[in-house]
Amino acid sequence: MSTRRIRLGVNVDHVATVRNARGGHHPDPVRAAALAAEAGADGITAHLREDRRHIVDADIERLVREVPLPLNFEMAATDEMVAIALRHKPHAACIVPERREERTTEGGLDAAGQHNHLAPRVARLREAGIRVSLFIEPDRRQLDAAVALGAPVVELHTGRYCELEGGARTAELERLRKAAATCGTLGLECHMGHGLSYDNVEAVAAIPEVMELNIGHFLVGEAIFIGWKESLTHMRRLMDKARGINGG
């Protein structure tokens, strides 16, 4: 069991989803980010989609300006999004696959198959001092592609692990563990995210090579019942417990 503290990145996309359902300014994802900082979050994640279905451009501007936490800017590998990232200079840019017809991100980026498309965009972001990560499947081919592209960080897709049950879940967890260990040998910083909840986070948080978990939708939903800060602090406690940290 690793005793190194794992970082919690809080995704505020779906605070914006609730706001946009009715229009106006409430609930404010930037306020949610500021409260997340008070509750012990280590960073904020926000995905600016092409169709602006939740986070909008003004949110990104305010998150960079008003919230005292590093911003992980999730983005598709398009010239529009690269230009926005270069304008705002977030701490990190996580390149994700994006299809307009999907409800949420459905799988990892094919970094290996899209090398020629990704390479110049990764290079532009890195030249601007933005830390690039790639949201990929826990697959050796994709890890090798991240190294070839010069991305220092990968975020491994945990959605399949969260959806499966029984032996199939155990097998997927082992796949994540193996990929995380490979990150260590390749010199990649390993993050994980997608679909994590109180019921499944501890096994992932216990993987010693994992430096950060990014969690959003579950926390927003849980906040309806127990409050925003408490939803985050309970997740933090579970992550610390998985690492054997006092108070976890």
Image (spheres, rainbow, N blue to C red):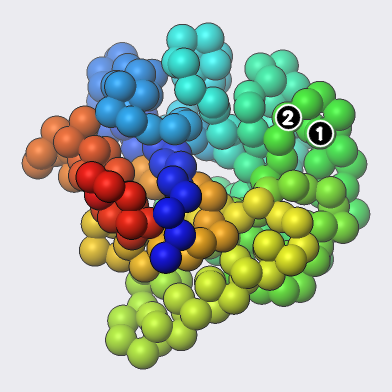
Task: Reply above or below: 29 against 199.
Answer: above
Please rate how many residues cluster around mark 2, counting C-alpha atoms within 10 Å: few if below 14, some from 14 to 19, many from 20.
Answer: many
- Tell me where residue 206 sits by quadrant: bottom left
Query: Can you tell which mark lies on residue 82?
Result: none
- Helix, strand or loop at label 2? It is loop
Q: To which residue does mark 1 refer? A: 126
Q: Is residue 156 left or right of residue 44?
A: right
Q: Secondary structure at mark 1?
A: helix
Side of 159 where 100 appears, left or right: right
Query: Tag 1: Cα neighbours inside 10 Å, few (<14), some, or many (≥20)?
Result: some
Residue 214 in the image, given as x and y percentages of width and height:
45, 46
* Residue 246 horizontal side relative to residue 13, left or right: left
What amino acid is found at the position of numbered circle 1 in the picture? Arg
Q: Are marks 1 and 2 in contact (CB under 8 Å)?
A: yes
Residue 18 pos. (x, y %) = 28, 32
Q: Of the residues shown, which amino acid type is indicated by label 2?
A: Ile
Residue located at (84% from left, 49% from top)? 150
| Residue 10 seen from this side | yes
Q: Residue at x 56, y 60 (%)?
A: 209
Q: Which residue is tagged 2?
A: 130
Give coordinates of residue 143: x percent, y percent. Answer: 73, 65
The location of residue 210, given as percent across then percent down, is 53, 56
Picture quadrant of residue 194: bottom left
